[in-house]
Image: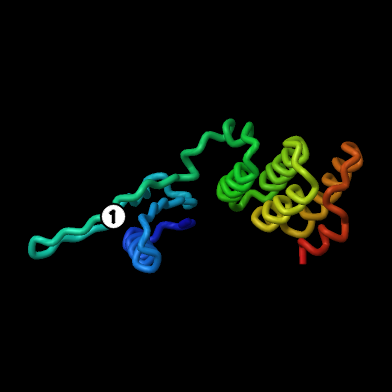
Amino acid sequence: VQAQVDTDFEQRMFVYHYRIYDRHQQPVVSLGVLADANPGWRPMGFGYARWGCRIQLDFPVVKLLDLDWDQLAASQNPFAVLVQAHLKTQATLGDDPQRMSWKLALVKGLYERGLGREAIVRLFGFVDHLMALPPGLDEQFRNELAMLEKEKKMTYVTSIERLGIRK
């Protein structure tokens, strides 16, 4: 997983690939997950040739920017929420009120997906950490979340857990 453009990424993928193969003597599948904000950066392989000897590793990549928002929202896969949180964190850099709105929407979505309490608490912890808000907006977010929990009669994230997550 690579969250920013890195000119050494392709070589690092090659090194990881051959080291895993060397250690386990098993076929290896390498997949790059690109979580950066640059739509044009799409590394796909590494190789070199010298004196008639050639080696090449081509690997598939998943660019998070390419994923369809509506499909993520409809997915029952909990990782879809994490991808959504990541994408909206990137999209709301410098726009804290918009980030708070998206954070609240994503957390509401956790409740609506029919997930169990433990899954909601864990996913909430990730979303809360990733989509950090300044103190005033964080307090507003907590108040709106408390109202949501009351309305839904689902106190999945207690005030003590929220305090612990915040610390």
Q: Is residue 161 visible?
A: yes
Label 1 belongs to which residue?
57
Q: Nearer the viewer, residue 135 or 53?
A: 53
Give the residue drawn at x 65%, y 44%.
78
- Direction front: furthest residue: 25
Q: How many numbered tags mark residues here?
A: 1
Residue 62 x/y as whole percent? 44, 45
When the figure is inspected, residue 70 is found, relative to residue 41, above or below; the finding is: above
Q: Residue furthest left?
A: 51
Please state the horizontal and vertical placement of residue 30, each as a whole percent of the image: 39, 53
Q: Amino acid at mark 1?
A: Leu
User: In the displayed structure, does residue 119 sit left or right of residue 11?
Assistant: right
Residue at left 77%, top 51%? 118
Quarter of the picture holding the C terminus: bottom right
Q: Is residue 12 visible?
A: no
- Numbered disc 1: secondary structure: strand
- In this picture, is 10 found above or below 107? below
x and y percentages locating residue 161 in the rendered image:
83, 59
Front residue (pair 157, 4) = 157
